[in-house]
Image: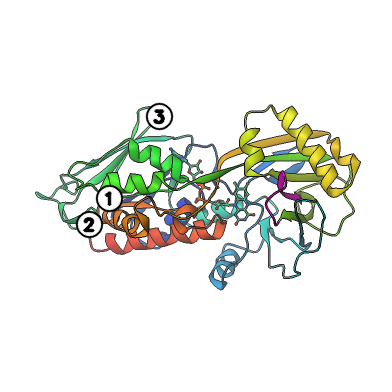
């Protein structure tokens, strides 16, 4: 049996563990938060549930739909109302009518990661922030004299992760890093990998060059429901202060009848400029913007508000790096040879839940294949 370490219990991390579910290998996930799901996140307050990161999962392909149904239809919600559009002038218009399925769960979108992990024997160590990594390059962690031919390459080798409390986790035969690129870059900066032949510096350079944009989400609650035909509004021109606005009451099980809960995601420009504003100030401004956009003055006065700043919300691009795609691919391949994998939406090059998930599954499958030779 071999041991896989995973940093991050978002969809990429859950996907990597899921890929090992029918193998003899075990997986340990280190997650800095108190829950799983990462940016596919749900909160509860006053009888409401709201998805304050990813709003829903679209089905980019058949396999995603099959997987979601395999995880159980109970509590699955397909949001019926459409997404409409607006631009800089705030003029709302119906979308193209080509609305695909938009899935979440009655208990919230965190169900996706929870259900994937429930299919595995993975151990999730919550409130465990990975802080540094060391590669034991000498092989022989399996007790052989000169190492093995496992994922650590012909010299064997294993990865140990130290958390913020100074506790060690591992050694792992393979390690998958799934935090957003800037946080993965921090981890790589705190990685010791002796005799790496320059691979670590190349990998770090590629990861550091992968930019993310910031989104601040405001959840605004009202003691009434809006009478409008849409679920969500998206700024197609990307010029408005609001990038996205939607109604959680369109998701079964999220908001009690007769109440309304708006999710307002502010543009990256607004979010960066107002990232440290108090909840009160940010909510007041978001509510005024929402009232103007929807054309309903009542929205300027929510009865409660909550927020989440996503400093690393969405990747601007995939993993490329200053050296270009070939250099990045070379660095990723060299790290994989040594049992160090990267996964996540930014590795896939698309800030989408399904992209993160399949990227994690691909990493897990690739590791399982390598480990099976042990
Ligand atoms: C506001 C917003 C709206 C979005 N809307 C949609 C949408 O409607 N539909 C859609 O498909 N996608 C949407 N997305 C994108 C989607 O949420 C992401 O693409 C996806 O969830 C990324 O998953 P991941 O596993 O790659 O990363 P993450 O979900 O970020 O998971 C990484 C995990 O690593 C953990 N971590 C970080 N550093 C450490 C450390 N040092 N030690 C331990 N753990 C660590 C984090 O806590 C996190 O749990 C949205 C994202 C945001 C922010």
Marks 1/2 in contact by CB < 8 Å: the verdict is yes
Q: Quadrant of the C terminus?
A: bottom left
Marks 1/3 in contact by CB < 8 Å: the verdict is no
Within 10 angstroms of label 3, few (less than 14), some, or many (20 or more) residues?
few
Task: Work out how far the residue at label 1 is from the one at label 3, CA to CA, in angstroms.
Answer: 22 Å
The stretch in magenta equals 236-247
Question: Which residue is found at the position 24% from the left and 46% from the top?
Answer: 158
Q: Earlier in the sequence, mark 1 or mark 3?
A: 3
Q: Quadrant of the N terminus?
A: bottom left
Question: Which residue is found at the position 68% from the left and 62% from the top?
Answer: 102
**Label 3 element class:** loop
**Label 1 element class:** loop
Question: According to the image, label 2 marks what residue?
Answer: 150
Q: Earlier in the sequence, mark 1 or mark 2?
A: 2
Dot label at residue 44: none
Question: According to the image, label 3 marks what residue?
Answer: 164
- Would you say residue 189 is visible in this rendering? yes
Question: According to the image, label 1 marks what residue?
Answer: 173
Marks 3/2 in contact by CB < 8 Å: the verdict is no
């Amino acid at each position: 049996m071999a041991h896989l370490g995973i940093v991050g219990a978002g969809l990429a991390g859950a996907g990597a563990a899921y890929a090992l579910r029918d193998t003899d290998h075990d997986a340990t996930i280190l997650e800095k938060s108190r829950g799983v799901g990462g940016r596919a996140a749900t909160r509860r307050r006053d009888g409401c549930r709201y998805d304050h990161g990813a709003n829903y999962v679209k089905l980019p392909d058949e396999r995603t739909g099959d997987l979601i149904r395999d995880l159980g239809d109970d509590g699955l919600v397909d949001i019926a109302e459409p997404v409409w559009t607006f631009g800089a002038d705030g003029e709302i218009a119906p979308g193209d009518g080509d609305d695909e399925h938009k899935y979440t769960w009655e208990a919230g979108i965190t169900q996706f990661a929870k259900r994937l992990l429930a299919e595995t024997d993975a151990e999730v160590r919550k409130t465990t922030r990975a802080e540094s990594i060391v590669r034991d390059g000498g092989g022989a962690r399996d007790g052989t004299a000169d190492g093995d031919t496992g994922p650590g390459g012909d010299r064997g080798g294993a990865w140990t992760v130290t958390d913020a409390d100074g506790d060690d986790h591992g050694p792992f035969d393979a390690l998958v890093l799934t935090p957003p690129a800037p946080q993965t870059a921090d981890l790589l900066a705190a990685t010791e990998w002796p005799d790496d032949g320059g691979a670590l510096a190349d990998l770090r350079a590629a990861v550091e060059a992968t930019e993310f944009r910031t989104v601040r989400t405001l959840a605004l609650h009202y003691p009434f429901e809006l009478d409008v035909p849409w679920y969500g509004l998206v700024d197609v021109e990307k010029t408005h202060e609001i990038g996205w606005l939607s109604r959680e009451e369109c998701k079964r099980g999220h908001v009690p009848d007769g109440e309304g809960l708006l999710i307002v995601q502010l543009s990256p420009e607004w979010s960066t400029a107002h990232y440290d504003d108090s909840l009160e100030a940010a909510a007041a401004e978001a509510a005024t913007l929402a009232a103007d956009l929807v054309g309903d003055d009542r929205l300027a006065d929510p009865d409660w508000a909550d927020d989440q700043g996503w400093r690393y919300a969405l990747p601007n691009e995939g993993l490329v790096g200053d050296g270009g795609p070939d250099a990045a691919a070379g660095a990723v391949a060299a790290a994989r040879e040594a049992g160090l994998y990267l996964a996540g939406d930014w590795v896939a090059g698309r800030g989408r839940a399904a992209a993160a998930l399949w990227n994690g599954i691909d990493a897990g499958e690739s590791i399982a294949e390598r480990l099976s030779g042990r």
